[in-house]
Image: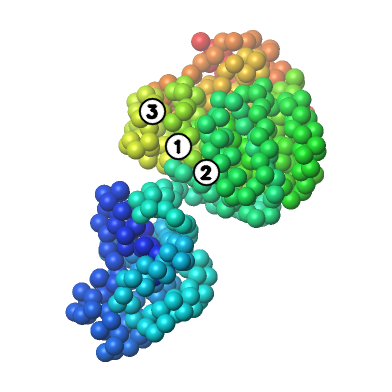
Amino acid sequence: MPTRPVAVIIGMMGAGKTRVGKEVAQLMSLPFADADVEIEHEVGMRIPEYFERHGEPAFREVESEVIAGMLHGFGGVFALGGGAPMTPAVQDDLKEYIEDGGKVVYLMADPREAMERAHRGGGRPMLQGDADARWKKLYRQRDPVYYRVANVHVETYGQTPLAAARKMMDMITERTVHVTGATIEDYDVSIGEGAMNHLSEVLGPKPVRIALIHTQPVQRHSDRARTLLRQGGYQVSDIVIPDAEAGKTIEVANGIWQRLGDEGFTRSDAVVGVGGGAATDLAGFVAATWMRGVRYVNCPTSLLAMVDASTGGKTGINTPQGKNLVGSFYTPTGVLADLKTLVSLPNDIFIEGLGEVAKSGFIKDPEILHILEEHAAELRAFDGATFLGSGLENVVAELIERTVRVKAYHVSADLKEAGLREFLNYGHTLAHAIEKLEHFRWRHGNAVAVGCVYAAELGHLLGYIDQDLVDYHRSLLGSLGLPTSWNGGTFDEVLALMHRDKKARGNKLRFVVLDSIGHPVHLDDPPADAVEEAFRRIQA
């Protein structure tokens, strides 16, 4: 495999591509290269001299060849000259680089600052004559092309080179999962430090009012979201809801509807949910039901919410009869999984999120299971205070990305859970019963872990998988600090609740089981004795 740059920086003359690029490279312990310097080495003379002798067309040809070589043989941060992205051959090479996972960064400096720096620097053939007038003309030509060519846009207005470099580093290390499908509007899940900075970009210019829905424990993160929203020019209504499942009730939703009505929220306004899975579920439900649907963005602050509740468009509330029985399928405008929010996450709440991560490995992506095995001890010892900048951060980011991709695969093909999407409910039939019988004192991810063991036991009893795979469920989940057994209720109580599960058809139970890792199947109306025996085997 050829070596690829970690990032390619484009932008106007004077935007600070070299200075900021060097800062980014230093922060990331990477080499830095400037296309203009590489070209001068190639031709053996200064660029102004080459321009004068051979003209711009010859220069652009050499420039294209040098850039093509660097895109396939340099593993650091690479800055291009201002005119390079205007050349069709370079545009094609950058497009291929992006398709291969590359980050092309448009460094968007304040035009007045950039123009002044470009004028000061001198030695720029494209600014001969009236430099200011030439710069402005070039900017009008190039800005739309830069914007189209780049897949990362970094504004640096008024920032020091180091501050701009830190912002760029956060954005180029982000992971993005694009969720698409025939029946949904496309949206992105952004994963990384500083992902919440995209709030205004995702919401767009149309909304005036934003309902910021959050819980009290995530106040520091909602404060940041509020600041970003106000900087973006939005009017913010701060709405605090009860924590966890207590916030997912019709009474809480009704209180929010009343407030939206009193404050004049219209169809063009929007909702932002900040918090764990319950908060993002409720925010989505409010957005789906207010005036038959307004835009909403989720900013999940727990591992569980990042990999599950915030993504996929399932919104809902609980009723006395069960969990998530009232809701809608309504996709967000974007999901911003900011890893900085995990610093405030207690160890036990982080670990419960691994239940949903492991589930995704069992049903679709075995590499998730390998990563969990390899890093089980580190994950089990998670400490938010030391998380950022540690080796574990990249591991967690990859687990989130892979888990979201599993969810996106199922959601894109089956938004409304008519078939394929039901595989995401592996382990959930029992899990929801456990949560209900425990009055939601058991966290969702912990219940899912036990539910996965139950599904494995049921699959083994009916001949789908062997005992080794059942044992693997127990050993992997246990190594992560997740529970693998439960004895908080009777079989009759559990059976009654499983009959109310969303997958149930009439009086017949329906489960998801495996026939091997990565290959889930539907199990309709299994024998009653097997259902009961599997339950007996997961009791502590």
Which residue is disc 1 drawn over? 340
Which residue is disc 3 drawn over? 385
Q: In the shown orientation, is residue 532 left or right of residue 390?
A: right
Seen at 38% across and 49% down, the residue is 163
Q: CA distance from mark 3 to mark 1?
A: 10 Å
Looking at the image, which is closer to me, 429 or 460? 429
Looking at the image, which is closer to me, 89 or 445? 89
Say if mark 2 contacts mark 1, CB within 8 Å.
yes
Q: In the shown orientation, is residue 320 left or right of residue 512?
A: right
Q: CA distance from mark 2 to mark 3?
A: 19 Å
In the rendered structure, which disc, 2 or 1, sits on the residue that comes first in sequence? Answer: 2
Image quadrant assignment for residue 296: top right
In the rendered structure, which disc, 2 or 3, sits on the residue that comes first in sequence? Answer: 2
Looking at numbered disc 3 in the image, what kind of residue is underneath it? Ala
Circle on res. 196: 2
Residue 406 x/y as whole percent: 52, 43
Neighbour tally class for label 3: few under 14, some 14-19, many 20 plus, Cα within 10 Å:
few
Residue 515 x/y as whole percent: 52, 35
Looking at numbered disc 2 in the image, what kind of residue is underneath it? Met
**Residue furthest left as drawn:** 44
In the rendered structure, which disc, 3 or 1, sits on the residue that comes first in sequence? Answer: 1
Residue 33 x/y as whole percent: 27, 63
